Image (cartoon, rainbow, N blue to C red):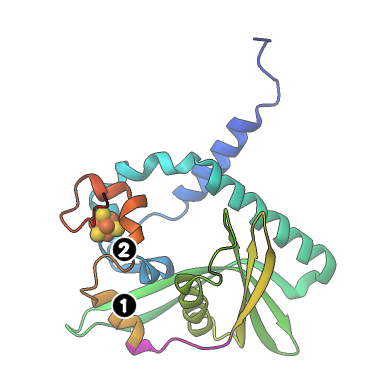
Amino acid sequence: MEEGPQLDLINLLYRVSKEEREKHPRKPGTYWVTDLVRCVLKRDYELKYPELIEKEVFTPVFILGTLVHKGLQELLRSTMGEVVLAEVEGSREVILPDGKKVMIEGRADIIVKINNEMIGVEIKTARSDYDLPKPQHVDQARIYNWLFNLKHTILVYVTPERITQYLVSNKISEEEVVDRITTKNIPRYEWECRLCSYSVMCPYKISSK
Ligand code: SF4
C-alpha cells in the first residue's frame, strides 16, 4: 500500500459526524421528534446504555444521507438565497398525564419562507423507492408542522430508482404527541427490532425466523 494520503477524507467525515452527534446529547426531560416516530423504548435504552450505539457514528448509509442533506441545503441556498434556513432547531413544552412537563425538540432539515409562510423540507435517502411515502416520515412531517407552525412540509425522497416529493399539510395535535410518548405499543413498527442496537438485550424484541 502506498503512503497514506495527506488529505484524509475518511478522518474528516468521521470527525464531522462525531462532532455533530456530540452537539446533541440526550437529556432525560427531552424527547426528540424522532423519538415520537419510532419504538419508545429506544430512547430509554439510549439514556441508559449510550455506548451501544456509538458505532453508528460511522455508518456509510448515514454518511451518504448527511452528504445528500448538505448538498440539497446548499443547492437551495444558492438558488433561493436568504429565504432558505437549514438545520432549524425548535422546541415546545407538553404536559404528560402525570403532570410532568417535557420538552419536544426537533431540527428541520430546511425551512423556506415564502410570502410570510413557512414551508418545511424534510430530506430522506433510501435504498429503494418501495412503498413511499413511509408512514413514519409522514408522521415526522406532521410533527414538524406543529413544532414550527409550518404551512406544510415537503418530504423529498432521494433513492437510486426515484427522486420524488410529497406534500404533508396535516399538523399533529398536542394530544397525539402525548399519546406517542406514553404509548404501550412496543415496538412502534415490527421491522424496527431487526435494525435495533438494543435487540441484544430487549425483552420486547420481535424475533423473526
Ligand atoms: S428490540 Fe424492538 S422493542 Fe426492543 S427497543 Fe429495539 S425496537 Fe424496541
Q: CA distance from mark 1 to mark 2?
A: 16 Å
Mark 2 crowd level (few <14, some 14–19, many ≥20, 10 Å Cα): few
The quarter of the picture where the N terminus appears is top right
Picture disc at residue 152: none
Q: Residue furthest right?
A: 79
Q: Which amino acid does the dot numbered 2 rest on?
A: Glu
Above or below for 58 versus 47: above
Kindly identify which residue carries mark 2.
190
Q: Is residue 43 left or right of residue 11?
A: left
Q: Is residue 156 magenta?
A: no
Q: Quadrant of residue 188?
A: bottom left
Point out the quarter of the image occupied by ligand 1: bottom left
Q: Which amino acid is tagged 1?
A: Arg
Q: Secondary structure at mark 1?
A: helix
Circle 1 residues within 10 Å: few <14, some 14–19, many ≥20: some
Name the residue carrying label 1.
180
Q: Residue at x 19, y 84 (%)?
A: 99
Residue 159 location (% of width, % of height) = 64, 57
Is 198 displayed left or right of 130 in the figure? left
Q: Residue at x 70, y 26 (%)?
A: 7
Which contiguous range is marked in magenta? 169-175
- Mark 1 against mark 2, which lies toward the viewer? 2
Where in the figure is residue 136, as x and y percent of width and height? 45, 71
Q: Foreground: 36 or 203?
A: 203
Depicted 208 relative to depicted 131: above or below: above
Given residues 162 and 70, the one toward you in this image is 162
Q: Residue at x 49, y 39 (%)?
A: 58
